[in-house]
Image: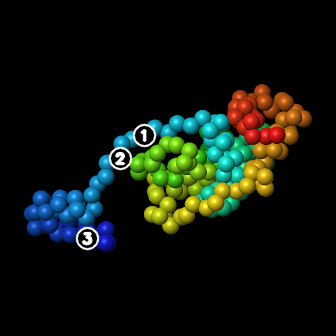
Amino acid sequence: MIDDKASVLLEVCNSLLDGDVKQAGQILDSEYPFERIERKSRTYSRKQVTKIFVRDGFIDRYSGKKLVFPASLQLISTLLPKKFPAHPNGKMSETHIAFWELWPTVDHIIPIARGGEDEPSNWTCTSMLRNSIKSNWKLEEIGWTLMEGGNIEEWDGLMGWFFEYIKNDKKPLEYPHLEKWWVAARDYVA
């Protein structure tokens, strides 16, 4: 078995140069086979996502950095729109970079596109930024490791702040995006 993948393709190309298409195919089959993956859909609710954020303690499991509850970021933007802007479609030129650096997302540790399951044991909390970078790569392919989750008692991603603010001023719940996060997370706030 050839260890270097580029060398496998060199052997394939040499066989093709020799006009031996069958040999080229056999080399690929044995040394660098194509593995077809059945496409699976991603399905999780805002409540399930919040559960993962809480489970992982609002920590980016790929970098170890703290993340912030999405509704807290949105509320800050609602209250300080010129200083902390957020474009409704995420237009980067009109949105504070914190929305990529600190917004938690659920990532599939083993990507769906690579055969991973769409279930909580394969879900982890990471930032929008790292989720975009990782894309469909496996951790070992990009040299990343899965770090321990955080402790929600030590860092709650400013989720407690969001609920404290709403307790004092319900007006932000008139915004559907904030109200939906409030509903999804209220079970996790004492």
Q: Badge 3, how many Cα within 10 Å: few under 14, some, many 20+? A: few
Asked whether, in this view, residue 34 is left or right of residue 100, the answer is: left
Tag 1 near tag 2, CB within 8 Å:
no
Asked whether, in this view, residue 80 is left or right of residue 63, the answer is: right
Give whichever of discs 2 and 3 has the lower sequence position.
3
Query: Which element carries disc 3, helix, strand or loop?
Result: loop
Tag 2 near tag 3, CB within 8 Å:
no
Q: Is residue 186 or residue 85 the one in the foreground?
A: 186
Asked whether, in this view, residue 87 is left or right of residue 139, the answer is: right
Instruction: Identify the image quadrant of residue 38.
Output: top left
Residue 171 appears in the picture as rendered: yes
Query: Which element carries disc 1, helix, strand or loop?
Result: loop
Residue for badge 2: 37
Is residue 20 depicted above or below 104 in this figure? below
Residue 133 x/y as whole percent = 53, 56
The residue that appears at 82% across and 40% down in the rendered structure is 190
The residue that appears at 61% across and 47% down in the rendered structure is 105
Asked whether, in this view, residue 70 is left or right of residue 167, the answer is: left
Question: Could you tell me the amino acid type at mark 3?
Answer: Met
Residue for badge 3: 1
Tag 1 near tag 3, CB within 8 Å:
no
State which quarter of the image contains the N terminus.
Answer: bottom left
Residue for badge 1: 40
